[in-house]
Amino acid sequence: MPSIAHRDERPQSAPPQSALHDPALPRRIAHLDMDAFFASVELLRYPQLRGLPVVIGGRRRTPQEGASAADAALPLSAFERLRNYQGRGVITTATYAARAFGVGSAMGLMKAARLCPDAILLPVDFDAYRRYSRAFKDVVRSFAPVMEDRGIDEVYIDFTHVPGGQEQGGRVLAQRIQQGILAATGLTCSIGVAPNKLLAKMASEFDKPQGISIIFEGDLATRIWPLPCRKINGIGPKTDARLQALGIHTIGELAQQDAGALVRHFGKAYGAWLHDAAWGRDERAVVTESEPVSMSRETTFERDLHAVHDRAELGRIFTALCERVAADLQRQGYCGRTIGIKLRYADFRSVTREQTIALPTQDAATIRRAAGQCLRRVALTQRLRLLGVRVGNLVPQSEVALLPVAAGTPELF
DNA sequence: TCTGGGGTCCTAAACCGT
DNA sequence: TCTGACGGTTTAGGACCC
């Protein structure tokens, strides 16, 4: 389920959970995952599409194109069909009816159109999803205040000291939260409750949709070890392939490996983490707030562009990206010192360049100037398919004395 | 017919100063 | 003065996640 990622799940220095209240209570951590979130929101807005193959995604279209105004009375003929889609783009979410045709997240739309030409294509409407996201999180917090935001459609919740949080291992509270969210939004979700985040995350997938799964430490061998390693949040396709090459397919097989051998193969931090994860060990706390580290904007072009031949168009896009990042920074009240660019060539290789400036900024022209210097450091002979602008090293605006901008240097575009 | 956009964190190398 | 050992910061790339 695509959305806005928040913080990486992979190994990091994990401050141990502080047992503030009653250290005798066993830690019960819930992971709540909304069921097919984007698609479910769209089906609330367009109930006439229920049961039909619907995919969400594609490049942004103007509001007039396709079906944009939420209208339950809109006839089916008003919706754009996948077969009529032209150009780049991937599927963000597909309804279960569409998945039956073999289409799914991250699939190119042209390929999906061949599998299911009659599918209805809806544009992504992040504003709508954000409204529903706020609504379900408000419900969660009304039951359990220690909630960690994990992006648009999922959260971790510390059940340990919440009334009902220990009953039946957390099932009672999980049911209340599910019912509360359904009543407030019309949406369903799945919840896993376990001794820690790692296991809770896995548990929430056990019984989708509308499931509740309760895991205790003693369930490790029976319910976790039979699963493929890929089910561990933090083992992606690359690591999985390396594990497979070593003959390690399940979490149980991973757990049986010597920790030292894993460290030799995967490095000190990651190797040790793999071993811990296979044994269900995870001490990370549920963190209720965090500061952003970077903000970025990027765009894939309708067609590959050439630095020289399409210079004017690239320049416009580049400036617009800088302006959007600056607007994001200003709206959210941050300034940043590290300005970077990312570009992707037609052959899909990508490169990044970045530069740290003297003072944190949120000014579009300053960002544009620094990003322009980064751009001078990359080869621009090949055609480009993507351009991005990033500002990192963020500090809250309130901590920065904003100074006038220095005179610029000549730029490429 | 290839492959979106917005994030986080880790690692290794380069570089700089003590 | 030269060399080496560290250690901190910046930079580029990669892996992973939603």
Image: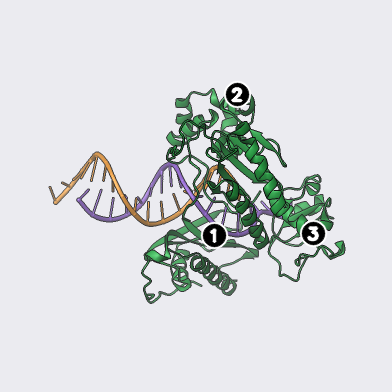
Chain colours: A green, B purple, C orange
Q: Amino acid at mark 2?
A: Ala
Q: Quadrant of residue A225?
A: top right
User: Quick check: can you spot residue A111?
Assistant: yes
Q: Tell which circle, 1 or 2, labels the residue nearer the N-terminal end.
A: 2
- In the rendered image, which residue does mark 2 sit on? A221
Is A222 located above or below residue A397 in the figure?
Answer: above
Q: Amino acid at mark 3?
A: Tyr
Q: Residues within 10 Å of mark 1 (few under 14, many from 20)?
A: many
Q: Amino acid at mark 1?
A: Leu
Nearer the observer: mark 3 or 1; the answer is: 3
**Which percent across, then down, holds residue A330?**
49, 68
Q: Tell which circle, 3 or 1, labels the residue nearer the N-terminal end.
A: 3
Report the residue at 74% width, 50% height from top: A94
For the residues beneath circles 3 and 1, the answer to whether they share a chain is: yes
Nearer to us in this view, A99 or A127: A127
Report the residue at 45% width, 30% height from top: A263
Residue A343, label in figure: 1
Nearer to us in this view, A226 or A27: A27
Q: Secondary structure at mark 3?
A: loop
Residue A46, label in figure: 3
**Marks 1/2: CA–CA distance:** 45 Å
Is A196 left, or right, of A118 in this rendering? Answer: left
**Marks 2/3: CA–CA distance:** 44 Å
